Image: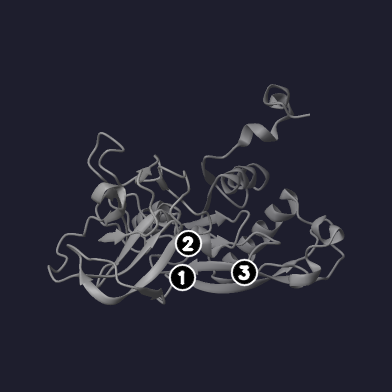
């Protein structure tokens, strides 16, 4: 799909790496397709469900869904060419329904005007008319409106406000996502995401290795818990949750206690006392997964931590990292 841009300086566009992961020029290996729908991989070697990657550039193809796309400057640097690898057996009549570039919680901008060094602004648009995937000249557009059924159920758990005060009876509604699509029932494993700083729905799509590879292979139940004070998990509501007194309850100890209580209660509810739990997470979520295993070894038998900055939690390394 070729996107014609207005007001480009005579110097044309240039693209910065690495925010164009799909491009053949980015790595020696062949380009890799990414499925932005969070459902099934485009190919066995695909990097699946990378939500932020799909915020760089993507195409909505009829009958396929959103696909990660490469972005290349063409026509003397005045247009962006978005291209994606279609899954095998895609109909030759498949049409592009929408395009998206740099549109997400963290705008990933790779195309810049070489004359002004200003980025091409993000967009997320539906085409006025469907176009063949092979080629398309940009018509005026309107905002995209697409809706898909999430691959999980959303539930809420009555959670304790303060685990350090057992006598306190106050509770709040903690959101969690759960999928029994591949679960083999009581006795089969549970994969538990230790939610970190953000709405929990945003993390599901970034964990395809767990939800789409490990879960079906292990026959596992998948649970994503939202961290207190984020998303819809606000102990004192949208107004009262952000006072200094309320935020004093936003600690790693309280968060881990939330997860331990949620899991213990959920296993009892599902009659799954013999189901072993493995925690997983990325970045701060990976740190929480590690700490969860260390502090609650009777609740989780293992933890998979990706890009977890554990060293920053040890005073031993503070001096060499410039921490006072």
Q: Secondary structure at mark 2?
A: strand
Q: Is residue 275 visible?
A: no
Density class for disc 2 (Cα within 10 Å; few <14, some 14-19, many ≥20) is many
Residue located beneath label 3 in the image: 175
> Is residue 168 found left or right of 130 in the rendered image?
right
Residue at the (53%, 65%) spot, across then down? 201
Residue 20 image position (x, y, % from top left):
36, 46
Question: Which of these two is toward me, 92 or 248?
Answer: 92
Residue located beneath label 1 in the image: 152
Residue located beneath label 2 in the image: 222
Between label 2 and label 3, give the one nearer the viewer: 3
Residue at the (26%, 57%) spot, across then down? 42
* Cα separation between marks 2 and 1: 9 Å
Discs 2, 1 touching: Cβ within 8 Å: yes
Residue 136 image position (x, y, % from top left):
22, 66
Question: Which of these two is toward me, 37 or 178?
Answer: 37
Residue 211 picture quarter: bottom left
**Outermost front residue:** 10
Q: Secondary structure at mark 3?
A: strand
Discs 2, 3 touching: Cβ within 8 Å: no
Reading the chain from its start, which is encountered first: label 2 or label 1? 1
Q: Quadrant of the C terminus?
A: top right
Q: Secondary structure at mark 1?
A: loop
Reading the chain from its start, which is encountered first: label 1 or label 3? 1
Discs 1, 3 touching: Cβ within 8 Å: no
* Cα separation between marks 1 and 3: 12 Å
User: Count the marks: how many?
Assistant: 3
């Amino acid at each position: 799909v070729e996107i014609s841009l207005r007001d480009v300086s005579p110097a044309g566009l240039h693209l910065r790496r690495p925010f164009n992961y799909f491009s053949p020029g980015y790595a020696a290996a062949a380009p890799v397709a990414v499925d932005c729908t969070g459902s099934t991989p485009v190919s066995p070697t695909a990097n699946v469900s990378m939500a932020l990657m799909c915020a760089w550039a993507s195409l909505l193809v009829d009958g396929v869904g959103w696909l990660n796309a490469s972005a290349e400057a063409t026509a003397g640097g005045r247009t962006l060419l978005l291209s994606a690898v279609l899954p095998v057996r895609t109909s030759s009549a498949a049409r592009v329904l929408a395009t998206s570039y740099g549109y997400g919680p963290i705008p990933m901008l790779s195309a810049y005007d070489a004359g002004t060094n200003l980025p091409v602004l993000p967009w997320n648009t539906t085409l006025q008319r469907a176009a063949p995937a092979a080629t398309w000249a940009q018509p005026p557009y309107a905002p995209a409106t697409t809706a898909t059924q999430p691959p999980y159920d959303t539930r809420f758990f009555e959670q304790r406000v303060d685990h350090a005060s057992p006598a306190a009876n106050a509770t709040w509604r903690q959101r969690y996502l759960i999928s029994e699509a591949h679960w083999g029932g009581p006795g089969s494993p549970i994969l538990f995401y230790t939610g970190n700083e953000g709405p929990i729905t945003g993390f599901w799509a970034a964990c395809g290795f767990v939800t789409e590879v490990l879960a079906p292979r292990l026959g596992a139940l998948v649970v994503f818990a939202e961290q207190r004070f984020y998303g819809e998990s606000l102990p004192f509501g949208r107004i009262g949750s952000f006072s200094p007194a309320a935020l004093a309850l936003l600690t790693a100890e309280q968060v881990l206690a939330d997860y331990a209580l949620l899991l213990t209660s959920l296993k009892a509810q599902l009659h799954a006392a013999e189901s072993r739990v493995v925690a997983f997470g990325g970045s701060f979520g990976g740190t929480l997964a590690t700490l969860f295993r260390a502090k609650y070894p009777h609740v989780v038998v293992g933890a998979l931590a990706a890009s977890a900055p554990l060293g920053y939690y040890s005073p031993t390394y503070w001096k060499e990292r410039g921490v006072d």
